[in-house]
Structure formats: structure tokens, C-alpha cells
Image: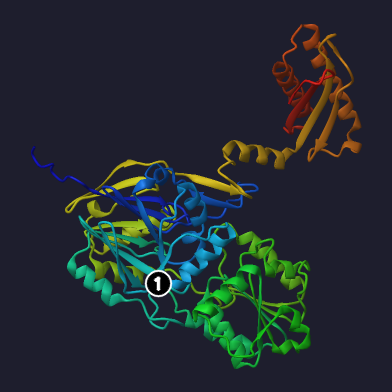
Amino acid sequence: MPKKKNTSALKVIPLGGLEEIGKNMTVIEYEDDIIVIDCGLSFPQEDMLGVDLVIPDVSYLVKNRDKVRGFVFTHGHEDHIGSTPYVLKQLAMNVPLYGTPMTLGLINLKLKEHGMTDVPLIDIQPGDTINIGPFDIEFINVNHSISGAVAIAVNTPVGMIIHTGDFKVDFTPVTGEPIDLQRFAELGKKGVLGLLMDSTNAERPGYTMSERKVGDTFNNYFSKAKGRIIVAMFASNVQRIQQVVDAAARYNRYVVFNGRSMVNVANLAADLGELIIPEGRLLDVDDIDYYDEDQIVIITTGSQGEELAGLTRMAFSEHRKLDIRQSDMVIVSATPVPGNEKYVSRVINQLFKKGADVIYEALDDVHVSGHACQEELKIIHTLVKPEYFIPVHGEFKHLRSHEVLARNLGMDNRHIIRAKTGDVILFTKNTARIEGTVPTGAIMVDGSGVGDVGNIVLKDRKLLSQDGILIVVAVVDIQNGVLAARPEIISRGFVYVKEAEDLFDEAEMIATNTITNCLEAGRYEFNSMRNKVKDDIRAFMYSKTKRSPVILPVIMNVSGESNQ
């Protein structure tokens, strides 16, 4: 029997993170083996009413679960690890997870919240190489706004694929080593088939400032503050937390952590040696009042204006133990995530109303990005010299800007892959092309429900939020073909009933006439009756109010049958 010719191609399939911010997830597949890079989530948009989180559609992975060998993670931000418990539950299998100690520590906190205690977690360090099936996977140190960030180089049977993860070039990081540019150059000399690179800041010229610049700003304000200092930031930014702790010690202040995620991350980072707090400098929130105001620094969540986060609760006097005082200096050390601007502005305005001195990004350098700007992107392109380039991690405008940058560096336009989420990118040793797609999309998480909120439910929620609901309750006697009692209309979020009694009296009369006409015509089928009531009441209410509330008829039979 003739030997089968090997025509296998490598598949690279982004399941999220292209033409969007967040939900980062990339599948690398060769024959019967799959590895997954990152497993992130995104936060709901304004029109996703009641939705808590958005995770990738992983139906392709579920269909091919027997091929999945493991997940490798670039770093521990929510948009790269946040959907891990949900995805593992859908796969119904405990594949190993690989990441740096900080990354795995944050993942483990999530797994414990979901009662998942038997998932294999395998620590790696920058510089390590592991083997999974046909893949040799190397982890390369990079700088980002969280400890333990790495790029991932995957040596496959058809060539080398490099995924940078989120990164920037910081020659003076607060903790850890600078980005390993030497290793990128070495891999570039050996030959790189495909490069997937962070595009978040591809529109921005120049270089991203070093994280130490924020530390200089902290020192400046700490030296001036007369009362308490409250610093709001992302809990995951351990390097920035360290700079606040260092400034607090320098100016003889004690540190208090506020907010569940802030406390959890600080404890984890301290256990791993990623956060160093001088002996005796950490206070419990209950002990604040035993110290003078000029001895206190509070590090809190709430930099995005989240309703239940620490800073928001303090600003609106809803916190159990902390309230904003006129003597406070509040530093909001973050930039608003797209979509959060109005929430952040609301909190800042409230802080000013309370008399606090508020410092935020528009006023001073209290935040720097964790993503590479154009000159840093050029460095990686020049060192790696990929045969093919795929911009990832960003909205369409970011990906487009990164394409233009690559072309300006001399890259052949035919070797720039303009992929979308769900595209299947096929690599051979000499070629790359998009061939087909896999199912993708946004799976919404609402409370404990995963995927049970879709566009129809969101449309209903939007209608309810705009015009409210009218419930029409009627009792009929099917046996005798008559209405047993006059219908009652219950209103929520539509109009104030006591001020619209005539309107509701007329609506109840219309419902009476509609149901009576149906019964007299011998139309006893509940669905038909319900739809007729809905149509007549909707038309009447729109003619009177120019509003279209959700109409919910509830028609019951005195014999006990009902149809809602």
C-alpha cells in the first residue's frame, strides 16, 4: 500500500480578540493536537442590560475536545484568563494550564470560586520550554502592566509561530527584568513563519512611558498630601501597587487594601514574593481610626467607576467603613476602559463634590499604558522579521493601523493576514492563507446563567427599560363562553397609575371588548385570544402615549386552565 503523503497544514484560529477589546483566545492546531493561547473575557456593552460578562463561543473546541492538550497563558489580566472556568466546564475535561506563578495564582482564585479544585496547574518561568504533542513552546519575558507576562513562541512542524501577548518595551521595570529583546532577535535569525502581535496602541506614535514615571508622580503628591491618600487602580497591577507601598513607606504612612479583588491579589502577590510590604506597614481597615490622617494610604478598587467597587462606594457614602473626607487626596491611577468613561466621570465629579483633592490622568502622569506604541512595535517587527504577520488584540482601527505600520517597514502586503475572529488561517512551510471559518460569537453570562441570555432577551430588556410593561390579567369562563370578571391592568415602568386612571379604565374596557368578541365568535384558543389582546392594547397605548410598552396578557379559565 503506498505511503500517504503528508499534506497537513497548521491551523491558527482566533476565537476572540480581533476587531474587539478583550475576549482574547487563539487556537493552534496541527492534525490531532490543539493548544489554546489565553482564555479571556470582555465586559458588557451598554446595551447588554443585566449581563455580567461576555465570553468567547468555544463550540469549535467542544466539538474537538479530544484534540485539546492544554492552555498556555501570556498573563493574568481578565481579558486573557477570565473565561477559563466557564470554558473548562464546557469542555468537561481537566486539561493542564501553563503559566507563570502570578498568572496561575489569579486563575486559581477563579477556579476556586467555581468549585474547581482538581485542574492541573503547571508553573513555568520566562525562558522555559515545554513540549505538548508536536509543539515545542517557549516562554519569553516581556513587560506589561502585570507581573509574570510572557510572549509565547510555538515551534510547530511547519515553522515558528510567535504570539507576543500584551506587551510594551520597558527598560526600567519596577519588578522583574526588561523585555528579552535578545531572544526575539535570536528567533528572528532562525526564521519565524508567523507573528501575532498586540495592536492596542498601534495608533499611538512614539514609546510608552516606563511604569517608573508613575512612581515619580506618586512621590511628588505623597510629599504634599496633608490628609489621607486614596489610590484607585486595577487590582492586577502589582507593580503599581508596589510603587504606592514604597511611597507610603518613604513618607511614613501605613497601607490599607480595600476591595475584595484588591485584597485577594495583594495577598497572592505577597505570598509569591511579587509584592514586598515592609514589616509593620500594613493595616486592617478596622484600625484606620487609631492613626492620624497623614499616616494613611488606602489602595482601592474602583478606578473604572464600577457601581459596587470600593472608590464608588466611598464617593457615594455607601461603604461600610470608609467615607470621603474633605482632607483626602484621591489619585485615580488608571485610564477608563472604552465604554466606562461616563462612570469614571460620575465618580470623579462626586469626589470633587465631597471636597476631596482629586488627581486623575487628564491632570498628571498617574497612569501609563501597558501596551507598546508604534516605535516599540517597530522594534519587534525588525527583530523578528516574520514571513507572515497577523495583527491581533484590538478594534478594527487598531488592527488597520498596525497593518499600515508593517507595510511602512517594507513588509509585502500579501504577507499581512487580515483576519477576523473565527477565521481559519492555514500555514504550510511556505504559505499562509485564510480558508474558512469556525463558529464564533459572544456568549453572555448573567449571574449563574451562561448563554441563556441572547439577542431576543436583550431586546426584551431594552424594551422594558424604555417603555415598561403592562400585564393584562383576565378570567374567562370557557364552559359558558363569557368573561368572568372585568380585566385588570398592572403597570410597571410605564406611567404612574394614579395619575392615569382614565387611561387604564379605557384600556380595561378595550381588553373586555376584545375578549368578549373572541368568546362570542367561538374562538376559545388561548394563544389567539392573548395575541388579539396584545395587539389591541398596544395600538391603543401607542395612540394615546406614543409609547410601546411590553404587553403581557395573562388569561385564566375559572376551571383552572391558563395560558400566559
Asked whether residue 421 appears in the rendered view, the answer is yes
Left or right of 150? Residue 233 is right
Which quarter shows the C terminus?
Answer: top right
Q: Which quadrant of the view contains residue 35?
A: bottom left
Where disc 1 sits, the SS reads loop
Left or right of 430? Residue 32 is right
Q: Is residue 56 depicted above or below 483 in this figure? A: below
Residue 430 coordinates in the image, percent (x, y): 16, 53
Can you name the residue that lies furthest to the left here? Answer: 2
Name the foreground residue: 564 vs 512: 564
Q: Is residue 245 depicted above or below 486 in this figure? A: below
Type of amino acid under label 1: Lys
Left or right of 246? Residue 60 is left
Q: Residue at x 57, y 57 (%)?
A: 115
Q: Which quadrant of the view contains residue 345?
A: bottom right
Residue 97 coordinates in the image, percent (x, y): 42, 61
Residue 27 coordinates in the image, percent (x, y): 36, 52
Name the foreground residue: 92 vs 143: 92
Can you name the residue that lies furthest to the top here? Answer: 521
Residue 463 coordinates in the image, percent (x, y): 68, 38
Q: Which quadrant of the view contains residue 247?
A: bottom right
Q: Residue at x 78, y 87 (%)?
A: 290
Residue corresponding to mark 1:
168
Asked whether residue 73 appears in the rendered view, the answer is no
